[in-house]
Amino acid sequence: MFIPIQLLERFQNLLDLKWSNKLMYSWINHNSLYILIFIFPLISTIFIYFYVSKNKFILLSSFLFLTLFFILFKVFFQPQTTDDITQIELSEIINNESDVIVEFFSPNCMGCVLSEKAVNEFREKYSKKYKFIKLNISDDRYSELVLNNLVTITPTFIYYKNGEMKEKYVGMLNDSEKLLEKFTQK
């Protein structure tokens, strides 16, 4: 079968475009907190300029206040650090424990920061039933696990039962019971 080279090149460009869109989306997801720190104060200041006041003092002070607020938010409400385990230890835990939940997070992800309370509640309530592991996707030690499980959005929670992936929950978590419902329905 003969396929014209131009058709193959167009197809390759289409694949590259889809890949770059996914890459951009995942970059935005993983760095949403940084984006919020710089973009939200700027947009708010522009809004104030057009709809509230053109006074330079008010504009500058509102911009500085909002920027400082989000920087402090980033500093004080960052998700907890990664559980410090090697790839080999992680594989052993997943394969040897009966019920394991792995959370993939990014320290610069707004959804991860907002999910922190529900995640901590879940860990406290169900620590006897589930082994809970928290991994930073930016850590190169876990890149193979991130790629194998197709983790592109954070936070992502994966439930392993006896070494086999059973369920995946992707997105912000408001309630710890939501995670339990998702993982006990199967």
Image (cartoon, helix red, strand yellow):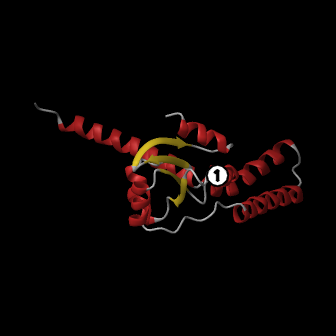
The residue shown at (59%, 54%) is 128
Does residue 20 sit above or below 67 in this rendering? above
Q: Residue furthest top?
A: 1
Task: Indicate the amino acid at tag 1.
Answer: Val
Where residue 132 appears, as percent x and y from the top left, is 55, 55
Mark 1: give few (<14), some (14-19) or many (20+) Cα within 10 Å. Answer: many
Instruction: Report the residue marked by disc 1.
Output: 119
Q: Nearer the viewer, residue 94 or 65?
A: 94
- Residue 153 shows in this picture: no
Name the side, left or right, on which 38 lies relative to 159: right
Where residue 148 appears, as percent x and y from the top left, is 37, 51
Q: Nearer the viewer, residue 163 or 143?
A: 163
> Quadrant of residue 21 in the image?
top left
Q: The N terminus is located in which quarter?
A: top left
Name the side, left or right, on which 39 lies relative to 135: right
Q: Nearer the viewer, residue 145 or 186?
A: 186
Does residue 113 sit above or below 177 in this rendering? below
Where residue 8 appears, as percent x and y from the top left, is 23, 38
For mark 1, give the secondary structure: helix
The residue shown at (18%, 38%) is 5
Q: Nearer the viewer, residue 20 or 47?
A: 20
The residue shown at (79%, 57%) is 66
Where residue 147 appears, as percent x and y from the top left, is 39, 52
